[in-house]
Amino acid sequence: MDGVGDISVPQLGGLTPLEKAKTPNLDRLAFGGALGQHIPVATGITPGSGPGHLALFGYNPVEYLVGRGALETVGIGFELRHGDLAARINFCTVDSTGAVSDRRAGRISTEKCTELVDALKSISVRGVEVLIEPVKEHRACVVFRGPMLSDSISDTDPGLEGEKPLDIVAKTSGAEHTVDVVNDFIIQASGILKDKTPANGLLLRGFALYEEIPTLVSRYKLSPAAVAIYPMYKGVASLVGMKLYPSEPADIRGQINAARKALKDGRDFVFLHHKYTDSAGEDGDYTRKVAEIEKFDSALPDLLTCGFDVICITGDHSTPCPMKLHSWHPVPVLINGGPQRTGWSARFTEKEAAGGSLGTFKACELMSLLLAAAGRLGKFGA
């Protein structure tokens, strides 16, 4: 459950959405399993979605730093080449002063996004090829293909509404050429979008040069699968060698059907991504976040019939409703299956996780816990 962790919400009587939600199925799994909490990157460090997920899959997110742009682009099936520079586009709304009034342009439809992308495809930047593709709702991606590109440049997304888009800055010497390339793109894009509504601007973030990384197949001898609806998460799954299984319909029920098919196909690791807890947190909608947690809980009995030996429920980071942003707070973890110190926890909540039998650990250590619970790790030493 993406962004599942939270903090006390005054409107919920000081409870978190997990504490407020009615989750009988999660609670049964908690009592019969083990709880703990993970630190996505490091204490006090707020993770992006890319590092957060790579850590869950056992990769040190500092060593394997993959930008969101590459993940988003791979997730829509775009074939990146070694050295391509990819970035995530957020279509946004800017006011008469140039400040961002809505970072997501009211979450425009994917059809509207496609229309805007088609308009931007007329952009031409000297010395590079510019490739633009729609993703979902307000999201799109842009790929710059050419020599001497660098991802050591800053984003334009201020991260807050009421602020103007940031200037792109070269973080290292040698990145100035890339700054010029991207600024040329932004100037042309701004001219095309200025009279559009509600998306009359764009923000760029997650600049990433594409480089291959080791897969779960080579690292853990797994045959992994992914069941995700949003391209970003399909991208991170593809990057580490997971086979993508489509969800039909595109909801939690369809995802469970896809997970069941993956197991029948002989896949022995399945990543199922539930986005909507994170979306609610980013919107500050604590009522909706409670509802999304309860919706996930109601689907759990069907998931449990798939035949998994070990089930883990967690998130890639916390997205507290009062903050409307990702945060550094530890993320609750539930592991059910295999030999566990059970009976320590009665509910799946932040408070119960903080006192659970798994303790607090780095997110990149989670895969070892899951493999051990499944009996997939041998003894170390004599």
Image: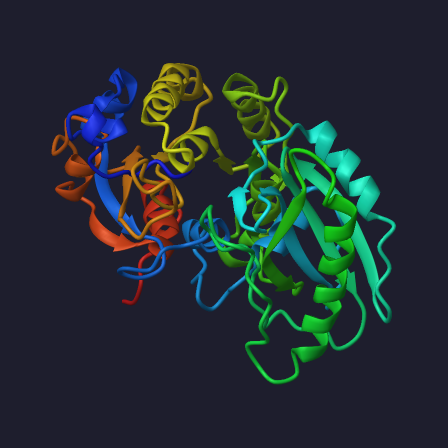
Figure quadrant of residue 225:
top right
Tell me if 189 is positioned left or right of 103 in this view: right
Q: Residue at x 59, y 36 (%)?
A: 105
Q: Nearer the viewer, residue 137 or 50?
A: 137
Task: Look at the image and tell me in which quarter the C terminus lies.
Answer: bottom left
Q: Nearer the viewer, residue 127 or 211?
A: 127
**174 in relation to 3, above or below:** below
Figure quadrant of residue 198:
top right
Picture coordinates of residue 361, whole percent (x, y): 25, 54
Q: Residue at x 38, y 47 (%)?
A: 326
Q: Residue at x 62, y 17 (%)?
A: 249
In this picture the colour scheme is rainbow
Picture coordinates of residue 130, whole percent (x, y): 81, 58
Asked whether residue 82 is in view, the answer is: no
Q: Nearer the viewer, residue 268 or 2?
A: 2
Q: Nearer the viewer, residue 164 or 233?
A: 164
Task: Kindly give the residue lying farthest to the bottom in the view shown.
Answer: 173
Picture coordinates of residue 6, whole percent (x, y): 28, 38
Task: Look at the image and tell me in which quarter the N terminus lies.
Answer: top left
Picture coordinates of residue 92, whole percent (x, y): 60, 42
Q: How many marks?
A: 0
Q: Residue at x 37, y 46 (%)?
A: 317
Asked whether residue 321 is in view, the answer is: yes
